[in-house]
Amino acid sequence: MDEAAPQAAAGADTEEVAKALEVLRLRWELDYLTGYDKEHGWWASRRGVIGHILTADSPEDLGQMIGLDPLVRLPHQLLRYRKRLVLLT
């Protein structure tokens, strides 16, 4: 019975990590590859750029750091950009 509590806690942590990774992926997948590991914590790597890696203590902090990147394309910006392309062609 003493072993069940740590295993349950480890499972909850894994589940929380998976949920947070899904949120990060849904929000930032166009520009960043995101992940988590016990050694480095939360990390994000800019797609197409070698050596640009962000690390943070929490998924919220990582999301804020990515959001400060001026090159990040937000969904509403993509839509506006796509409309301009249609008008120009």
Image (tube, helix red, strand yellow):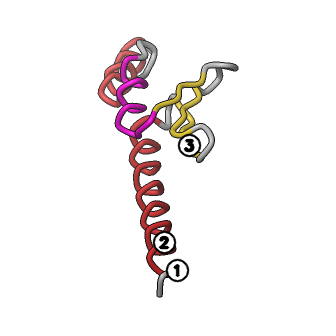
Would residue 87 appear left or right of 2 to someone viewing this image?
Answer: left
Look at discs 3 and 1 and give the one toward the viewer.
1
Q: Secondary structure at mark 3?
A: strand
In-front residue for pair 89/26: 26
In-front residue for pair 61/23: 61
Tag on residue 3?
1
**Mark 2 to mark 3 CA distance (whole Å):** 23 Å
Residue segment shown in magenta: 57-68
> Residue at image x 49%, y 37%?
29
Q: Secondary structure at mark 2?
A: helix
Question: Which x, y percent locates residue 66?
Answer: 43, 25
> Residue at image x 47%, y 43%?
25
**Mark 1 to mark 2 CA distance (whole Å):** 6 Å
Label 2 is placed on what type of residue? Answer: Pro
In-front residue for pair 29/59: 59
Question: Which x, y percent locates residue 14?
Answer: 49, 61
**Mark 3 to mark 1 CA distance (whole Å):** 28 Å
Q: Badge 2 is on which residue? A: 6
Proximity of marks 3 and 1: CB atoms separated by less than 8 Å: no
Label 1 is placed on what type of residue? Answer: Glu
Question: Which x, y percent locates residue 28?
Answer: 44, 35
Mark 1 neighbour class, 10 Å CA radius: few under 14, some 14 to 19, many 20 or more: few
Q: Badge 3 is on which residue? A: 35
> Residue at image x 40%, y 23%?
65
In this view, 19 is above or below 54: below
